[in-house]
Image (cartoon, rainbow, N blue to C red):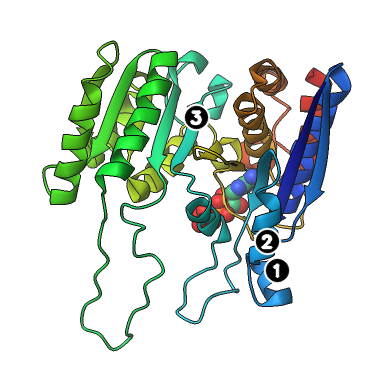
Amino acid sequence: MSHLRIALLPGDGIGPEVTAAAVEVLQAIEALSDDLVFAFKTFSVGAGEYLRSGDPLPPDTLAMAREYDAILLGAMGLPDVRWPNGTEMAPQVDIREQLDLYQGIRPVQLYEESLTPLKGKAAGQIDFVLFRENTEGLFWERTAGHDPSADAVENAMRISRHGADRIFHAAFRAAEQRRRKLTLVDKANVLPAMAFFREVFDTVAAEYPKVETERVYVDAAALFLVREPERFDVLVTENMFGDILSDLAAGIVGGMGMAPSADIGDKYGVFQPAHGTAPDIAGKGKANPVATILSAAMMLDWLGLPEYGSAIRDAVENALQNPACRTADIGGNLRCAEMTAAVVRQL
Ligand code: ATP
């Protein structure tokens, strides 16, 4: 019997709605299995918590969440709730740093042909995983303040040997389990830090002779993602490039509502949709829960239950074969709860 304790951090905006959807699917999995029991505990983190307590990520809350087997997160931050320096609160990024979740993993899969805006791409032709380095890169100075009267403001890109080495190993290991191709995305022709990133990549690549490698500049990667996404199996890149390309990648498989993600370190795993709090549709019951449901599937894979992760992905794929099974963001009129029920029915 597997007893799994899951910390839920629903957050702000549509976060609570999509987290509840994923919990419903996990409960359906539990009901189907003879040997699986989930215990869920909800913690308050995010802009709402800041308004309540003055801290969007109270230290005691994260200390408690660390004791759970995995963390399932909705979305955090609200446009009107900002730090004095004008930046939005992003406790999900603080969590990544505090738990050292250096692997930002974004699988990009086209579940049904009509969901892509690209012409002539069949479902099997878009199936890759983006590995984003989560702890340094161009996000390194994200908490630095700035003098509003300054004539120039600089933010450094940090690439450390340790940081690059560990994300590359993770990406190579993933490529070994897939179609054995890894694409490095960088800007080594312009920035010295990116040339260093590529040197570390070349060193690590020598340890994985069975994996074919290619090196692509980030601007070309953006073009290829739109023109020939089928060329990619696993991609690896620094923090900000990964942030940008993962939204582009989501766009070619149906948008933010279809894009799951996992933030993983050597000890902890946090699973959350790639989208934000979507304040424009929050509280309307219109959010697409699929990204969070697929993130819960990634959580089950990571917890050593890939058969249940696959069952969820199959249920999503089967549900989407019905052209009426669509929320508004993907061209339909199902509400969040109805979309969730459609996935549960397939299970
Ligand atoms: P962040 O900066 O936190 O990533 P963002 O401001 O880039 O957030 P999102 O909150 O992801 O943006 O929203 C971008 C757009 O995508 C919005 O129009 C939003 O309504 C839409 N969107 C995002 N997630 C979903 C979802 N699950 N279902 C439907 N629409 C969504």
Q: Is mark 1 within 8 Å of ligand 1?
A: no
According to the picture, the residue beneath numbered tag 1 turns out to be 49
Task: Give above or below for 310 relative to 155.
Answer: above
Measured Cα–Cα span from mark 2 to mark 3: 25 Å
**Figure quadrant of residue 200:** top left
Please give the residue where the numbered disc 3 appears in the rendered image. 107
Indicate which label's residue lies in the foreground, 1 or 3.
1
The disc labelled 1 sits on which kind of residue? Glu
Residue depicted at x 62% and y 35%: 295
Res. 96 mark: none
Count residues near mark 3 (Cα–Cα under 10 Å), then give few for <14, some for 14-19, many for 20+. many
Q: Residue at x 72, y 21 (%)?
A: 319
Q: Earlier in the sequence, mark 1 or mark 3?
A: 1
Dot 2: element: loop
Mark drawn on residue 45 = 2
Circles 1 and 3, Cβ within 8 Å, touching? The answer is: no
Residue at 21% x, 78% y is: 152
Q: Determine the residue positioned at 25% across, 43% down.
A: 161
